[in-house]
Amino acid sequence: MIEMRVAGIALDAITRSPIVLLKDSSDRRALPIYIGQEQARAIAGAIESQKPPRPLTHDLIVNILETWNLTLEKVIIHSLQKDTFYAALVVKQGETTKEIDSRPSDAIAIALRTNTPIWVMEEVIADASIPVDRDADEAEQQAFREFVSNLRPEDLIKRFGNGES
């Protein structure tokens, strides 16, 4: 899993649909997730630290977590199926930990309100992320190609042994 942070909310240029954009710590990969208008407002409100006069749904969930001494340990965006992302809230009470199914947009809105880390499975990033820094990606790929081209079988045998026990 890779920890990611919310980089912001954007609008798709063609459909005008809101997108929450997650980025990894190196700013090399971005994961765009299409969300609804209400979820976009909830996430934007959390980013801007807005406090509504009465608790909205995500605020209510945070209040329930706090009242019952539950800790949101992390949010995991764990799969992508037919253009739909799936997430889970990992909640802990004492020694008991439970995973609760959630839409990624709701999980992100709650995570922002509780300063909880957002993790994304590597398979999801591989399938749906977009490169942000193509030059760094190309430099890394070139360095790997050079490493492999200079690699000799003897180097592997010295490093890992010959496999005999």
Image (tube, helix red, strand yellow):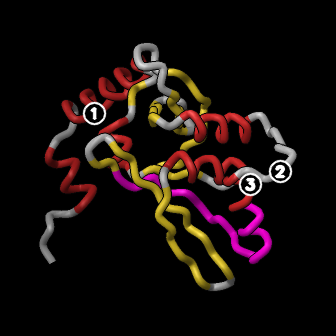
Labels 2, 3: front one: 2
**Left or right, 25 with reference to 140:** right
Provide the secondary structure element on which disc 1 rests: helix
Q: Which mark is residue 147?
A: 1
Please check the rendered image and state whether residue 66 is part of the magenta-colored stretch, yes or no: yes
Q: Earlier in the sequence, mark 3 or mark 1?
A: 3
Q: Is residue 130 magenta?
A: no
- What whole-number distance in Å separates the C-alpha atoms at marks 2 and 3? 9 Å
- Relative to residue 163, is residue 126 drawn left or right? right
Q: Residues within 10 Å of mark 3 (few under 14, many from 20)?
A: some
Is residue 1 something that shows in the picture? no
Looking at the rendered structure, the kind of residue marked 1 is: Phe
Give the CA separation, mark 3 to mark 1: 51 Å
Look at the image and give the residue range highlighted in magenta.
Answer: 62-79
Rendered position, 67 above or below 111: below
Quarter of the image that includes the C terminus: bottom left
Q: Residue at x 50, y 49 (%)?
A: 104
Earlier along the polypeptide chain: callout 2 or callout 3? Answer: 2
Picture coordinates of residue 66 (x, y %)?
78, 69
